[in-house]
Image: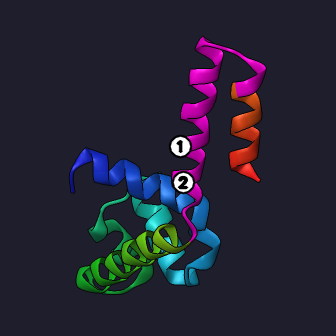
Amino acid sequence: MKLNEFLEVSILLDYYRNLLSDKQREYLINHFEEDLSLTEIAKNNGISRQAVYDNIRRGINQLKEYEEKLGFHAKEKKLYTELMNLKEDFTMERLDNIIEKLF
């Protein structure tokens, strides 16, 4: 897995972890936040490495689906960009436009 994909999954996990099954959430947290290998997760849970891999893959796909449908991360990135631009060139009109876009 490439670093940018690893970071993307970590961010999406922050947003949508509570929507995952208990096992998917546990394995994703173990792997992406606690930096455990698939082998370590498998050993800790008494299952095969392949079962861990399959659960993590399904979890990643679920996170991407949630982001596609709900878009919380994309909305936050857009808001952050707008606010950084506003910080550089503040006008009340620009602030009003950002607020209008939010609601």
Which quadrant holds residue 90?
A: top right
Q: Is residue 39 left or right of residue 60?
A: left
Q: Position of residue 17 (x, y in %)?
A: 58, 68
Q: Is residue 94 left or right of residue 21?
A: right
Where is mark 1, residue-wise? Answer: 77
> Distance between the Cα atoms at labels 2 and 1?
6 Å
Please tell me how crowded label 2 is: few (under 14), some (14-19), or many (20+) other residues with Cα within 10 Å. Answer: some
Q: Residue at x 54, y 43 (%)?
A: 78
Label 1 secondary element:
helix
Please tell me how crowded label 1 is: few (under 14), some (14-19), or many (20+) other residues with Cα within 10 Å. Answer: few
Residue 60 vs residue 85, the one in the foreground: 85
Colour scheme of this structure image?
rainbow
Going by the numbered disc 1, the residue's amino acid type is Lys
Please say if the residues under marks 2 and 1 sit with CB atoms less than 8 Å apart: yes
Going by the numbered disc 2, the residue's amino acid type is His
Q: Residue at x 76, y 40 (%)?
A: 99
Q: Residue at x 45, y 54 (%)?
A: 10
Q: Is residue 54 left or right of residue 15?
A: left
Q: Residue at x 69, y 27 (%)?
A: 94
Where is mark 2, residue-wise? Answer: 73
Q: In the displayed structure, would residue 63 be above or below residue 51?
A: above
Q: Position of residue 80 (x, y in %)?
A: 59, 35
Quadrant showing the N terminus: bottom left
Q: In the displayed structure, would residue 6 be above or below residue 24?
A: above
Residue 39 vs residue 16, the one in the foreground: 16
Label 2 secondary element:
helix
Q: Assign the magenta stretch its main secondary structure.
A: helix
Q: Is residue 80 magenta?
A: yes
Q: Which residues are magenta?
A: 70-93
Q: Is residue 76 magenta?
A: yes
